[in-house]
Amino acid sequence: MREIVLDTETTGFDPDSGDKIVEIGALELIHHVPTGKSFHQYINPERDMPQSAFEVHGLSKEFLSDKPLFADVADGFLEFAGDAPLVIHNAAFDMKFLNAELKLIAREALPMGRAVDTLLIARRKYPGAPASLDALCKRFGVDASERTLHGALLDAQLLAEVYLELVGGREPGLTLIEDDDSPAVQNGGAARRAPRTRPLTARITDDEQAAHAAFVERLGATALWSE
């Protein structure tokens, strides 16, 4: 199961008012385990950077002036995303911006049905509790100390950890690991355990064993496992 965890940074809140994407960060999960593959790109918005937006992500007009346009990175982003579900915190925001940028270059929109909104998941799971990315990092003990400013790739990395907690935590040991180069092992998953040198001590008492034997005897021919 392949998923893409995604975040964007922008010049503001509304692409219909001329706001643009200035950074895209995304990383790949396979069976809920990060593979180490990522996509990260700063983008020249060809417009001024409002002070309010600069205070959020620290990306200035000067810094972005020599970066590629969205049209130049769109193919790379779409190829990386493929047809995988897009895991996004407050998906309506990022999807609206991505589709506005895609429309400007006459590309097909990303269906909203592809988005997995971790904000909605968190609100359903913890009704009434704070559901920002910072709040969820704190709830799950995810280290967000480097998040002094918003950054698309860093936020995607934090969101990946939060997402795995929201959907039940990491359980890569449930998959069949064929070799030590598998994503599960390379990314902190469960490695093979050495075989036990001696069997575990039985926890069933003699009385319990006798009661079970008597029960099976009463079943007679219906106890298929005794054949």
Image: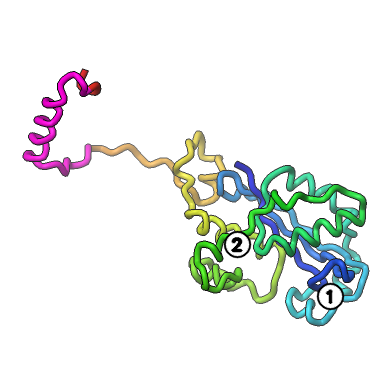
**Magenta residue span:** 199-223
In the foreground, 162 or 224: 224
Q: CA distance from mark 1 to mark 2?
A: 31 Å
Q: Quadrant of residue 69?
A: bottom right
Q: What is the quadrant of the N terminus in the image?
A: top right
Q: Is residue 56 above or below residue 9?
A: below
Quarter of the view holding residue 22: bottom right
At x 85%, y 59%, the residue is 100
Secondary structure, magenta segment, majority class? helix
x then y, percent, for residue 41: 79, 59
Task: Name the one closer to the observer, 158 or 218.
Answer: 218
Residue type at mark 2? Leu
**SS label for mark 2:** helix
Residue 75: say if magenta: no
Secondary structure of the residue carrying tag 1 is loop
Percent x, y of residue 167: 52, 54
Q: Which residue is disc 2 drawn over? A: 120
| Classed neighbour count for the residue bearing mark 2: other residues with Cα under 10 Å, few (<14), some (14–19), many (≥20) | some
Under mark 1, the amino acid is Ser
Q: Nearer the viewer, mark 1 or mark 2?
A: 2
212 part of magenta stretch: yes
Q: Position of residue 54 (x, y in %)?
A: 79, 78
Task: Determine whether 119 is above or below 51 in the image.
Answer: above
Name the residue carrying label 1. 60
Colour pattern: rainbow
Label 1, residues with CA under 10 Å away: few <14, some 14-19, many ≥20 = some
The numbered mark at residue 157 is none
